[in-house]
Image: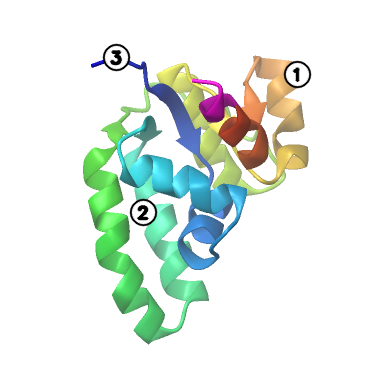
Amino acid sequence: MIYRPRYHVVIDTNVVFAGLTKTGSAAGLVVEAWQHDLICPHVSNALAYEYADVLSRKLSPAKWDRIQPVLQFMLTQARFVKIYYTWRPSSPDPGDDLVIDCALNAGVPVVTANLRDFRSAHYALGLKIMSPLAFVALLADM
């Protein structure tokens, strides 16, 4: 058996949402990689709550009932990160600050469909960011 290292990343809420609700997208492949333990996602408690909050608000109750156990399973596979230091505000969206805090405390890049909102943290704090498509391409080269 060939050992392949898993990539350590923080997955932005927009990628989790798109990956769980739309098939055939790069975000869907990122979520599938998470579900099949091909990557090591890092999540803080606040970010896990944000995932659940956004999904529960944006989905119909019936669809949320179907997706909630999938999200719970995914979170059992995640590596939870303690937030020792916050860099606030680093983004125009307060929800993105949760992602930035998690990634910087874990020392891993962020996979996001919204690169624009993370640019200031990229330049000011050295946060590594990549799109879902770029991340899938990286996984394909493993």
| Mark-to-mark CA distance, 3 and 1 | 37 Å
Helix, strand or loop under label 2: helix
Which is more N-terminal, label 2 or label 1?
2
User: What mark, if any, has residue 27 been given in the picture?
Assistant: none
In this view of the protein, can residue 46 be seen by the observer? no
Q: Mark 2 — residue?
A: 49
**Which residue is tagged 1?**
123
Picture layout, residue 113 above or below residue 18:
above
Q: Give above or below for 108 relative to 99.
A: above
89 left or right of 29 in image? right
Residue at horizontal 41 percent and vertical 20 percent from the top: 106
The magenta span reads 138-142
**In this view of the protein, which residue sits in the foreground, 44 or 109?**
109
Which residue is found at the position 41% from the left and 72% from the top?
56
Q: Nearer the viewer, residue 58 or 15?
A: 15
Residue denoted by label 3: 2
Answer few, some or many: residues within 10 Å of disc 1's Cα (few below 14, many 20 plus, some between 14 and 19).
few
Which numbered disc, 3 or 1, marks the residue that appears first in the sequence? 3
Q: Which quarter of the figure is the N terminus placed in?
A: top left
Seen as rendered, the residue at the extreme front is 1
Give the x, y percent position of residue 135.
59, 32
Q: Position of residue 90 (x, y in %)?
A: 66, 32
Residue 20 in magenta stretch? no
Task: Residue 91: give x, y in percent of width and height.
Answer: 68, 38
Residue 95 spot, x, y in % from top left:
56, 49
Question: Which amino acid, mark 2?
Answer: Tyr
